[in-house]
Amino acid sequence: MNTGQIILLLLPILILELSLLGLAIRDLLKDERHVRGGNKALWALVILFISLLGPIVYFAIGREDA
């Protein structure tokens, strides 16, 4: 398997990760958004540094309905 094939295999995962990252950060930065634990800075770190799972965890359990 050459480098071009590996890049083509990883590209959909990279696009998914960047999309989820952008959506999660955009949602977190809304003024009316309340998060579990009340600490948006901590959730931002979770989203940014826990790769693909960070945004998924944020959307699944981090958000609170107002």
Image (cartoon, helix red, strand yellow):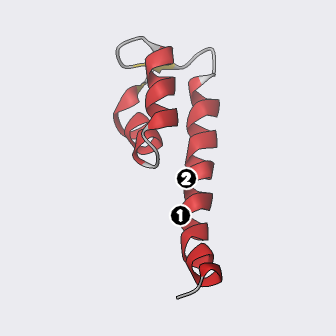
Residue that badge 1 annotates: 13
Residue 59, by quadrant, is top left
Q: CA distance from mark 1 to mark 2?
A: 6 Å
The vertical placement of 44 against 40, above or below, is below
The vertical placement of 20 against 66, above or below, is below
Q: Residue 1 versus residue 27: which sits nearer the camera?
A: 1
Residue that appears at 35% across and 14% down:
37
Residue that appears at 61% across and 41% down:
23
Residue that appears at 55% across and 70% down:
10
- How packed mark 2 is, by other alpha carbons closer than 10 Å (few <14, some 14-19, many 20 or more), is some
Residue that appears at 41% across and 11% down:
38
Q: Amino acid at mark 1?
A: Ile
Secondary structure beneath label 2: helix
Residue 11, by quadrant, is bottom right
Q: How many tags in the picture?
A: 2
The label number, if any, that marks residue 17 in the structure image: 2
Residue 44 in percent (x, y) is at 51, 25
Labels 1 and 2 touching (C-beta < 8 A)? yes
Residue 7 in percent (x, y) is at 61, 74
Query: In the image, is 41 to the left or to the right of 19?
Result: left
Q: Residue furthest top?
A: 38
The vertical placement of 50 against 39, above or below, is below
Residue 3 in percent (x, y) is at 61, 79
Q: Amino acid at mark 2?
A: Glu
